[in-house]
Image (cartoon, rainbow, N blue to C red):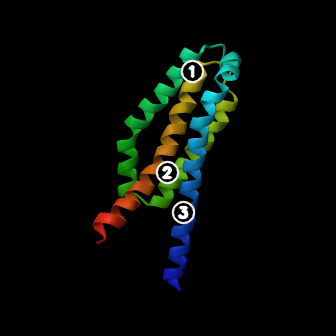
Amino acid sequence: MKKLKEMRSETLTLILVNLAGIMERADESLLPGVYREVGAALHTDPTGLGSLTLFRSIVQSSCYPLAAYLASRHNRTHVIALGAFLWSTATFLVAFSSTFVQLYAPLILNKFGLILYGSVVEFEDFHVRYVDQ
């Protein structure tokens, strides 16, 4: 019975992590399609929005080691919850951003929260493939 409950919680975690990944990909693919509208609202040009995308990638690559450490050393459920909290906080802050410069702080929170999801999934996959055998 305990094993079935544990399997259900692992399945639910996997589903939630994959849904977060789908949302992240949708976010990344939708932004280039609405560059003109977003640029007009933030009073910037496509070059500025391109730098925003570059900054997102830099933040993502620089935060990954910390996220991997958290995933390997702490309770994975708590790491996922922290990622969800950071992601939702960033979404809330983006809603109140009225200038291009104000988008950078929520951007850091957004990417770090999403990295926490990815690091947990990759850590689990690594253990299943290489360590647990």
Q: Give the structural element (helix, strand or loop) at label 3.
A: helix
* The furthest residue to the front: 33
Q: Please identify the quarter of the rendering in which residue 73 is found.
A: bottom left
Residue 117's label in the rendered image is: 2
- Residues tagged 3 and 1 counted as in contact (Cβ below 8 A): no
- Vertical comparison of 4 with 68: above or below: below
Q: Position of residue 71 (x, y in %)?
A: 40, 54
The type of residue carrying mark 2 is Tyr
Q: Which residue was labeled with disc 3?
A: 13
Q: Is residue 108 left or right of residue 67?
A: right
Kindly identify the residue that appears in the image at 49 percent across and 51 percent down: 117
Which numbered disc, 3 or 1, marks the residue closer to the eye?
A: 1
Q: Are marks 2 and 1 in contact (CB under 8 Å)?
A: no
Secondary structure of the residue carrying tag 2 is helix
Estimate the spatial distance between the alpha carbons at disc 3 and disc 1, rounded to whole Å.
33 Å
Mark 2 and mark 1: Cα distance apart in space: 25 Å
Residue placed under numbered mark 1 in the picture:
49
Residue density around tag 1, few if under 14, some if 14–19, many if 20 or more, within 10 Å: some
Comparing 127 with 74, the one in front is 127
Q: Earlier in the sequence, mark 2 or mark 3?
A: 3
The reply to whether callout 2 and callout 3 are in contact (CB within 8 Å) is no
Residue at horizontal 65 percent and vertical 31 percent from the top = 94
